[in-house]
Image (tube, grey):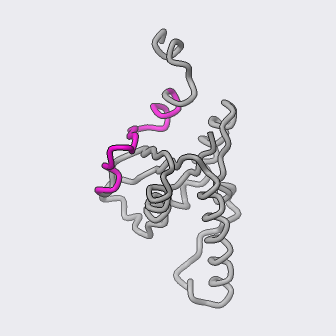
Amino acid sequence: MKFYLAARYSRHEELRGYADQLEHHGHVVTSRWISGEHEALDSELLSPINRRLAQKFFEDDMQDLLVADALIAFTEPADSGFSRGGRHVEFGIALAAGLRLFVVGPRENLFYLASRVRHYWTFEELYLDLCIPRDVAVAR
């Protein structure tokens, strides 16, 4: 399966580790942003250089999202202070496009409650569900 991983940018190193685990089991992770090359843009988003860079990052992210079969959204606690929210837009696009949807962490808004969204509190729970054969998981 091809996965797009959505999370706040500062978690890109953590998600690279999750991508490695998924890829080890034959899955493909399409999220180029987790490589760390899509540097976070500061508040000067409207400067000409940042606008060009932001447009390229947007195009990369959209391509990566739309070739995926599923999106895994890594959410944040309500009081975390992370509010830029690109991950929510990505989730909405995936929802509208009919991708399979997984949430790891708290349900940040009502869209994460959709009946076709599979919810996990940790990546380890999702990993066991997706990558470990049921008979092995039961034997544990």
Query: Residue shown at 62%/77% (left/top)?
Result: 54
Query: Residue shown at 46%/46% (left/top)?
Result: 101
Most foreground residue, 73 or 100: 100
Q: How many marks?
A: 0
Q: Is residue 62 left or right of residue 77?
A: right
Whole-percent x, y for residue 63 in the image: 65, 62
Whole-percent x, y for residue 36 in the image: 67, 59
Query: Residue shown at 62%/64% (left/top)?
Result: 61
Q: In which quadrant of the rendered image does the N terminus lie?
A: top right
Indicate yes or no whether the magenta region holds residue 51: no
Whole-percent x, y for residue 45 in the image: 56, 83
Occupied quadrant, residue 53 = bottom right
Indicate yes or no whether the magenta region holds residue 113: yes
Residue 48 sits above or below residue 82 on the image: below
Query: Residue shown at 56%/51% (left/top)?
Result: 5
Whole-percent x, y for residue 88 in the image: 43, 62
Q: Residue furthest top?
A: 139
Range of magenta residues: 110-128
